[in-house]
Amino acid sequence: MSIIFMLILISLIVALFFLIAFFWAVRSGQYDDDFTPSMRILFDDKVEKDQ
Amino acid sequence: MPEDLISAVETACYHCGEDCGSIVVYHDDKSFCCDGCKVVYSILKENDLCNYYQLNQASGISFKRRSMERYSHLDNQDVKEKLLDFTDGRQSRVHFHLPQIHCSSCLWLLENLNQIDEGILQSRVNFLRKEVTLVYEESGTTLRKIVELLATLGYAPVLNMDRLERVQVSAVEKTLYYKIGLAGFAFGNIMLLSFPEYFGMDSSAEATFARFFGYLNILLAIPVVLYSGFDYLRSAWHGLRRGHLNIDVPVSLGILALFGRSTYEIWTHTGAGYLDSLAGLIFFLLVGKWFQQKAYHTISFDRDYKSYFPMATTVLRGDLETVVTLDQLDRGDQLLIRHGELIPADAILLSGQGHIDYSFVTGESQPVPSISGEKIYAGGRQMGGTIKLEVMEKVTQSYLTSLWNDQIFDKETEKGITSRLATQVATFFTGVILVVAFATLIYWLPRDLTTAFHSFTAVLIVACPCAVALSIPFTFGNVMRILGNHHFYLKNVQVVETLAGIDRVVFDKTGTITYGQGAKSEYEGLSLSPKERDIIRSLVHQSSHPVSRQIEVAFRQDALLPVKDFVSDDGLGIRGEVEGHRIVIGSHRFVSGEIEPDLPGTWIKIDNKILGQIFQSGRYRIGLLGVIKDLVQRFKLSLVTGDHAGEEAALRKIFDQKTEMYFNQSPQQKLDYIKGLQAKKEKIMMIGDGLNDAGALKQSDAGIVITEEVNNFVPSCDAILDAACFSRLPVFLRICRLSLRVVYGAYFIALIYNIVGLSFAVQGLLSPVIAAILMPLSSITIVLFGMGISSLIARRLGLGSADGDSSSRQE
């Protein structure tokens, strides 16, 4: 049964990893502007110069 | 329909989509309305950026409504330092507010600026904020070149006096995200670790598990209390030290009781504690806080005159024109003010024909003519030719800006920051909780020490006013969103509460109940032939005088013909020759050439024959009558204006006889009037528009600014109303009042939950399971009740969300 201690600790560490990922996302500004990227994604890649 | 016929022959500009009129500029098989649009097209074409036109048709910004500014002050090292966000001497980063951003083409072009100017390394647009952040190489380009490029393309950045001050970007919003994230993480994990306990573990065999889960829970709860919940503890502590109870006091009592009792239980192996309730409580509270922080990205509620004044102005030093920033302007400096420019400081007119539009400052609707030697006040806008001025006072000491020295602008007034209702409830609540808690303690103490301790803490835990603390953020937050969808933008949720409790509505006149710019011109006199109408429009099209602009609106259906020998006699009138016909438009004296009789109004003469005059009418806002009719039944009304009393009779017809009306009021008098009413314990809502109302708006319990364009400058206020939605004002006030009742209803529900919870608690029977069920349940009920009922009310009043969406899409 002591394996449960291990499993719970591992699950907590995994959860902690996601918490840190969330903090990182906020810190790097991914939540600063949640609108413009939705417009940006519709643009085509750079138009070829020789066209 | 005749309108269709007209539009069929109209040519739309390839760049901005506007009607080209009769003068069409052809270039590259495309038609343009003016050279400005053509130039932008050429630049884009040259740099392979024509994708701009593919993304959205005719997406360009019209050149008709803009004036080219001068940017030579941007080469000044001081100015540059203030504008730049960051520089290391080689690379610099700067951000600009570009109110012209309106579609994906704008976004695309601005993010591809580096194809036009190689010195620009990176550009990033924030669409909602209408901001662009640029990184550029100092060796490749200059700040001035970038701004000039932006201006040429039609995106002239807003560079006002407030940019001369460094603004600290606050990181408050991000902290809230961290706190919610942490609380949510702990809440979920603690709940999972608590489940075994709820489902009944065999305590003898699995005691090690129970203990292990308990310790883990404490570990998870500590950061929640110390980080996520810290604001509540601190706010309660500050409140107590200043001697008043706020809603955070009972919340903090709950948090501390939950944490203390749970740690004790787990440590002594006497129980599982209530840590899941604790984490859930803080999580819900933070979500409520987040919900009520609806931010309007492009709208700012805290502006002063500095956002209205330009950054720099032209100063004459000897014969040399130099551009000087306003903070360096000093007495004795000679200014050169061109048409449409703002007078930045109190000054004396040295030369030129002054024609100053003070409407934004004093509320006076007609431009004031001034002759040399006269004093001209800061904040006025010169209409007509170029004038030369000598500065008398520094910018900060002018007549207009001295209003900001009034004490109400000094301290950050606490108006609207804390909810009065919530404070009242908190005081009452804390009192009741403490009485019940101590009564329980005293009752149990002689009988059973453990039960006494248990029930005492249980009362504090279960009575924690989570539901009470959530009802205001969610109900008022929801109402605030609904109002925002209908173009009535509130500064924060407390404004809803303030609007629910007002007794008197005070109106400003010019720009508030009348149209600021759009005064309608009507013609009276001999009937005009289509040819004569064309001639009139063609002549006034040449002039930028405000009266000419208004006349052109009345004749906008008519054709534009080329004008020869155009002469503008500043402040008197204009004349010219259109297809051989001599035409004169202006004051009666100017048109007739006779000194007597000097009739008011604007007169028209074609080929030596006076045809008639233009007068202004229909100036009151559409729907004003309905608004007043509705408001007069529920509120006391006042009208306070800087304009003269000439219109009183007409205004009396709209307002009723009881309405208090004051004319010729200075900004300070307006402020004092509001103060006087407040001394009589009246709650005031003031509706105004210009800088002249700034003091009164700030002094009022709720200051509302009405504006045609919400992104434009508005004085500091509590709410901004889009002029198009003016007629809905009574409905907006009604929904605020009803939403207050919804909050009362939510309080009642919270009370019932608390009575149930307390009945368990006083008997010492509050098990962690009951707490874990009761607390989230009450919170969720309150949230659903508050949001559901307020949305229902909104729909009943005709403010359905679907309607709001469609109207915002029309923009």
Image (cartoon, helix red, strand yellow):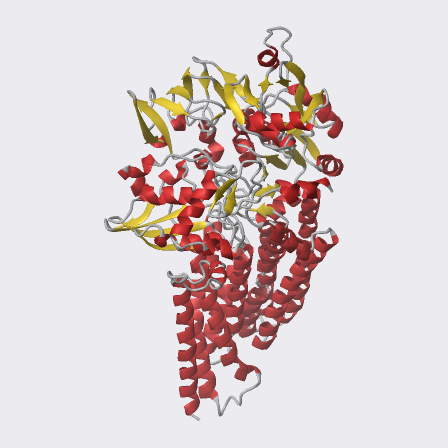
* Position of B135 relative to B774 (above/below): above
Residue B235 visible at all: no
Is B186 on the left-hand or right-hand side of B693? left
Vertical relation: B630 (above or below) B536: below
Query: Which part of the image, by quadrant, shows the N terminus of chain B?
Result: top right
In the image, B352 versus B58, the foreground residue is B58
In terms of image quadrants, where is residue B511? top right
Q: Nearer the viewer, residue B202 or B178?
A: B178
B450 displayed left or right of B559: left
Query: Where does the image place residue B469, in percent across and percent down from the top left?
Result: 58, 58
Question: What residue is shown at x 70% (from left), y 53% (from top)?
Answer: B794
Position of residue B643 measured from the top left corner of the image (x, y, whole percent) = 60, 23
Q: Residue at x 42, y 27 (%)?
A: B344
Give the residue displayed 54% in from the left and 44% down from the top: B13
- Where does the image place residue B318, in percent across and percent down from the top left? 28, 20
Q: Is residue B235 above or below residue B466?
A: above
Residue B437 sits in quarter:
bottom right
| Vertical relation: B120 (above or below) B327 | below
Q: Nearest the camera: B734 or B571? A: B571
Q: Foreground residue, A5 or B479?
A: B479
Circle count: 0
